């Protein structure tokens, strides 16, 4: 069954309690935060103290600017505060942001992220089982954990770790060592079926697990509106967002699945000159329909259910570049429709 989640609308900490309670009462499956303009962990700490059932996770936190030990403590505290509802979602980000925004090295991102996950498991195992910490890898080594710095075992152990992945290595690695994969919102049904699922399946076979033990989560580009004019404006905002992502070489596998990789160099050139209108004009209506869903909230629910039928995704949330405050009744209907509960 497809679960419908929600992105936290505002990261203003004073407003988080009201937002989190509302999203839980409406029936969303999870609240996700991301690392763009704000710290993704702080709002979840607040939300953990005012909710009781909704899952709480990062989608994603950037991994490499933080030591795995720092990530381990953050996740441990959030898992304890939420009584077992936290999901740690990590991503590598791209070279420019690591080196020029965070001022950290960016080498071997796939193997390094894999080792972040493995070292987290080793640290958590040492805390939970009260055993010696001894992790030695290519990028990280951890061998010191005295009682003074050991937070002690959790009642709800087993923190799920998802990683973000676009290329085959990341998808396969997620299937091998993680609990889930954050599929980028810039995706299509065909890309999921022909690219993501085979790679994840290969990783799952290496780990001896089945698909039922793994979660595929993402957001879906959505142009939502009650009128044709509203949907048209929302669609143009989505078109611009698709153009932005499609201009980045990282996402070439998504375009290549449809034979559209030839558009990338021109999008990239226009992005360097700041020609955002020109970039959007390169995204055809066929591309827009491939990467997004359009309609009223009621129609969107049906289309999400049909789009991801057969387990293509397990969790999704609406990605609306033109943010709209939807009424509660409409959101409840959306959740019921997606979950086959009408």
Image: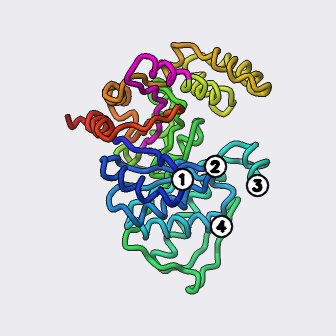
Q: Nearer the viewer, mark 4 or mark 3?
A: 3
Residue under numbered circle 4:
136
Q: Where is residue 309 drawn, in percent x and y?
A: 33, 29
Q: Where is residue 103 drawn, in percent x and y?
A: 78, 54
- The mark that comes first in sequence, 1 or 3, is 1
| Element type at mark 2 | loop
Q: Residue at (34%, 45%) from the top-left corner?
A: 212
* C-alpha separation, residue under disc 1 versus residue under disc 2: 9 Å
The answer to whether residue 309 of the structure is visible from this angle is no
Q: Look at the image and say whether residue 227 sits in the magenta stretch.
A: yes
Q: Residue at (78%, 27%) from the top-left corner?
A: 272
Q: Which residue lies furthest to the left in this view?
A: 342
Q: What stretch is highlighted in magenta?
A: 216-236
Q: In this view, does 278 lie to the left or right of 161?
A: right
Q: Residue at (35%, 48%) from the top-left corner?
A: 29
Residue under numbered circle 1:
11
* Residue in front for this viewpoint, 226 or 212: 226
Residue density around tag 1, few if under 14, some if 14–19, many if 20 or more, within 10 Å:
some
* Residue in front for this viewpoint, 76 or 280: 280
Q: Nearer the viewer, mark 1 or mark 4?
A: 1
Residue under numbered circle 3:
104
| Element type at mark 1 | loop
Discs 1, 4 touching: Cβ within 8 Å: no
Q: Residue at (49%, 18%) from the top-left corner?
A: 232
Discs 1, 3 touching: Cβ within 8 Å: no
Residue under numbered circle 2:
37
Q: Where is residue 50 drawn, in percent x and y?
A: 38, 64
């Amino acid at each position: 069954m497809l679960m419908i989640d929600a992105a936290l609308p505002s990261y203003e900490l004073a407003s988080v309690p009201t937002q989190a309670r509302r999203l839980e009462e409406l029936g969303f499956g999870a609240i996700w935060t991301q690392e763009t303009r704000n710290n993704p962990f702080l709002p979840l700490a607040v939300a953990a103290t005012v909710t009781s059932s909704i899952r709480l996770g990062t989608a994603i936190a950037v991994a490499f600017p933080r030591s795995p030990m720092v990530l381990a403590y953050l996740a441990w505290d959030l898992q304890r505060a939420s009584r077992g509802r936290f999901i740690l979602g990590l991503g590598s980000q791209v070279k420019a942001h690591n080196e020029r925004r965070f001022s950290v090295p960016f080498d071997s991102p796939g193997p390094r992220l894999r080792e972040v996950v493995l070292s987290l498991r080793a640290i958590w195992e040492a805390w939970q089982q009260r055993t010696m910490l001894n992790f030695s890898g290519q990028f990280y080594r951890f061998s010191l954990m005295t009682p003074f710095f050991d937070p002690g075992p959790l009642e709800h152990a087993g923190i799920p770790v998802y990683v973000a992945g676009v290329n085959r290595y990341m998808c396969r690695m997620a299937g091998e060592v993680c609990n889930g994969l954050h599929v980028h919102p810039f995706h299509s049904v065909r890309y999921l079926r022909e690219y993501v699922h085979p790679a994840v399946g290969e990783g799952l076979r290496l780990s001896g697990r089945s698909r039922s033990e793994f979660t595929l989560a993402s957001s879906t580009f959505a142009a939502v509106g009650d009128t044709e004019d509203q949907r048209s404006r929302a669609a143009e905002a989505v078109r611009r967002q698709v153009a932005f992502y499609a201009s980045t070489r990282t996402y070439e596998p998504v375009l290549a699945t449809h034979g559209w990789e030839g558009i990338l160099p021109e999008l990239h050139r226009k992005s360097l000159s700041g020609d955002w209108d020109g970039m959007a004009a390169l995204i055809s209506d066929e591309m827009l329909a491939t990467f997004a869903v359009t309609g009223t909230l009621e129609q969107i629910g049906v289309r999400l259910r049909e789009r991801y039928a057969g387990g293509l995704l397990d969790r999704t949330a609406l990605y609306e570049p033109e943010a709209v405050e939807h009424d509660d009744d409409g959101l409840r209907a959306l959740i019921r429709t997606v979950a086959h509960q009408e």
